Amino acid sequence: MEQVLKKHIQKSITLSDEDFDRLMGHFHIQTFNKGESIFIATQPVENAYYVVSGLLKLVYTDQDAAAHIVSFAMEDWWESDFHAFFMKTKATMSLVCLENTTVFALSLDDYWQICDMFPQMERFLLHKSNMGFIGAQQRVLSLLSTNAKERYERLIAQYPALLQRVSKTQIAAYLGVSRETLSRL
Amino acid sequence: MEQVLKKHIQKSITLSDEDFDRLMGHFHIQTFNKGESIFIATQPVENAYYVVSGLLKLVYTDQDAAAHIVSFAMEDWWESDFHAFFMKTKATMSLVCLENTTVFALSLDDYWQICDMFPQMERFLLHKSNMGFIGAQQRVLSLLSTNAKERYERLIAQYPALLQRVSKTQIAAYLGVSRETLSRL
DNA sequence: TTATACCCGTGACAATTGTCACTATTTTAA
DNA sequence: TTAAAATAGTGACAATTGTCACGGGTATAA
């Protein structure tokens, strides 16, 4: 199980086996069943999560009880309500399992300790954060510049496997259109 | 002029005067007139930019020649086409001055050199990146969950000064609605 | 097994937003 | 100063998308 995370980290940096073992002491493995929430809105966000296996949605529920999916997190992705995580505030979003899921959890204290102890890990996390920012900005751009049909077509082009794993209702909540509209594309 | 950047950096970290002077050697000051482009789509992106004074828009122009503003950058903000900057690819967006603007430019080589030379600066940039990611994700959320009127009202609530500085046309391109629709709110 | 919840498509209609056209005002640059 | 360009509001209409309602299918759990 740890090998998955090790492989992921070593895509970007190189760590000795001893360093990697010391590093792993900061992560905590957790498993959840389909339908369970790792955290929910209004509650504190203890950790950032690395997905070993399974599938998560980061979802915001508005006043009208409509769900909006900010992002999906699949194998090899990091996810959290990062605003709440870094600012130590209550979550505004919930992190919900769409499949049985195994994650490595990393607390905020451990996040900064890892940075202090392993400069290479700080570099790794800087890379991660930069890529996350770029991804979010491209999502902004797609919401600004394309209609529902185009967004849908690009999603299935980029993540064809996703369609087999989540319902159209979830896809619609991610694309920002109603279930019915998506159904008519 | 350098004092502005120094003050900005020292919000997050502490640097000795000597270190700060060494650091400044990596930045290059540039000035642009209103209407000029710092870089444009299809061209390489040499730098990331810290805005000392003035106002920028990061704008994407689609096949129909419609402009979509991914973000504004005002005093004390960092901006670039970060995908093109980090990946050393051609820009997909343009960075255009909405006012006469002064920036500090930082090349990618200097970005990583600064990280290597000053661990505190790497921490600073990690903070920056995390906050940028959070901001972009919240923009995704507002595009997903609110209509044009609500987005407009929240924008003027959060940045009331922006209305005095940019045209309604720009605001519309940022909110993702037509100029006419915005005019009718 | 059976009941319950979810999933997904579709018709009918309403609401929102976009597009085009025109006008008037302000800003910009020659 | 003056001409050109940008800005902003609005009417009329089209296109897109949302909402509500229904029904049949499929998964899930008691």
Image (cartoon, coloured by chain):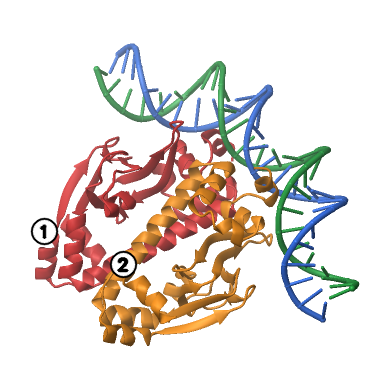
Chain colours: A orange, B red, C green, D blue
User: What residue do we see at 39% from left, 59% from top?
Assistant: A133
Whether residue B185 is situated above or below residue A16 in the rendered picture: above
Residue, disc 1: B25
Whether residue D11 is situated above or below residue B141 in the rendered picture: above
Element assignment for label 1: loop
Name which residue type carries label 1. Answer: Gly
Few, some or many residues within 10 Å of mark 2 (<14, 14–19, 20+): many
Residue B99 percent across, percent down from the top left:
30, 40
Identify which residue, A23 or A16, lies in the foreground: A16
Few, some or many residues within 10 Å of mark 1 (<14, 14–19, 20+): few
Residue B143 percent across, percent down from the top left:
54, 51
Q: Quadrant of the N terminus of chain B?
A: bottom left
Name which residue type carries label 2. Answer: Leu
Whether residue A184 is situated above or below residue B12 in the rendered picture: above
**B115 left or right of A30?**
left
- As measured in the structure, the alpha-carbon distance from the residue carrying label 2 to the one carrying label 1 is 23 Å
Residue, disc 2: A126
Identify which residue, A175 or B98, lies in the foreground: A175
Q: Quadrant of the C terminus of chain B?
A: top right
User: To which quarter of the image does residue A171 belong?
Assistant: bottom right
- Inspect this view and state whether residue B11 appears: no
Q: Nearer the viewer, mark 2 or mark 1?
A: 2
Q: Circle 2 marks a residue in which chain? A: A
Q: Circle 1 marks a residue in which chain? A: B
- Inspect this view and state whether residue A146 appears: yes
User: What residue do we see at 43% from left, 37% from top?
Assistant: B167
User: To which quarter of the image does residue B133 belong?
Assistant: bottom left
Identify which residue, A128 or B7, lies in the foreground: A128
Residue B23 percent across, percent down from the top left:
14, 63
Residue B111 percent across, percent down from the top left:
21, 60
